Structures are given as structure tokens and as C-alpha cells.
Amino acid sequence: MKNVTKADLVAAIAEKTGLSKKDAEAAVDAFVDVVTTQLQSGNKVTITGFGAFKTSARAARQGVNPKTGEKINIPAMTVPKFTAGKALKDAVK
């Protein structure tokens, strides 16, 4: 399995759309910025057929440092989540 980097994604988008790599990179950066801003505002971003980005609250909990065995407190935090849409799931099957 190959790891697709941002540069690979930009090159593929540029080739598929006919945009320059600079314009494709600007589009990818804009997409990431908009999704990040919306999630920071507490909004859900849904792309029909692809999936949905949303945030989830994770409660505080106790963990164990695997190196020392010492108990540590893990604070509550908000984490991003992605749920794949039906079309994406079907395409990957």
C-alpha cells in the first residue's frame, strides 16, 4: 500500500483538472482551511457521496504510561472525525 502525500494529491488533481500544480495546491490548501475553520466553529462538513467531517468530545480518562506503568490523567478534548459516505464505501469495497 502506497502512502499518498499532499504533493501526490496536488499532482493528481492538477492532471485530472488541467489546473497548474500551483492552482491545484491552492485549491487543496483552501479545502483544508475551510474544513478546519468549520470544525473549529463546531460545524459539520458534509460532502454528499464522499463523507462527513465532524468533531466529537472525548471525556477525560486515566491511562497508563507503557514505559513506567505509572497512571496518568488524559484530559478531555475535542477530536476531529471522518465518516465515509455510501458512495465512497461502495467504491472501496
Image (cartoon, rainbow, N blue to C red):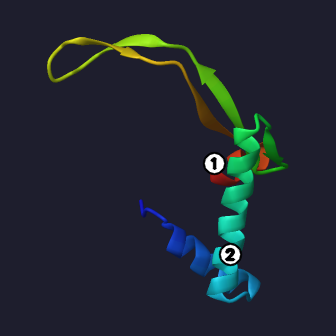
Q: Is residue 11 left or right of residue 38?
A: left
> Where on the picture, by quarter, is residue 77?
top right
Please tell me whether mark 1 or mark 2 is closer to you in this view: 2
Give the amino acid type for the residue marked by disc 1 in the picture.
Answer: Lys
Q: Can residue 52 be seen?
A: no
In the figure, 50 relative to 80: above or below?
A: below
In the figure, 93 relative to 60: above or below?
A: below
How crowded pointer 2 is (Cα within 10 Å; few <14, some 14-19, many 20+) is rated as few
Residue located 68% across and 32% down the image: 55
How crowded pointer 1 is (Cα within 10 Å; few <14, some 14-19, many 20+) is rated as few
Farthest residue, direction left: 68
Q: Quadrant of the N terminus?
A: bottom left
Task: Report which residue position mark 2 lands on.
Answer: 26
In the figure, 39 relative to 78: above or below?
A: below
- Foreground pick, 10 / 65: 65
Residue 53: x %, y % from top left: 71, 42
Q: Are marks 1 and 2 in contact (CB under 8 Å)?
A: no
Residue 67: x %, y % from top left: 15, 23
> Where on the picture, by quarter, is residue 57?
top right
Farthest residue, direction right: 48
The local secondary structure at tag 2 comes to helix
- Foreground pick, 53 / 72: 72
Residue 35: x %, y % from top left: 72, 51
Q: What is the spatial separation of the Cα atoms under label 1 and label 2, in whole angstroms?
A: 31 Å
Q: How many labels, in total? A: 2
The local secondary structure at tag 1 comes to loop
Q: Is residue 87 left or right of residue 73?
A: right
Residue located 21% across and 21% down the image: 66
> Where on the picture, by quarter, is residue 80?
top right
Task: Report which residue position mark 1 lands on.
Answer: 93
Residue located 53% across and 68% down the image: 6
Q: Can residue 21 be seen?
A: yes
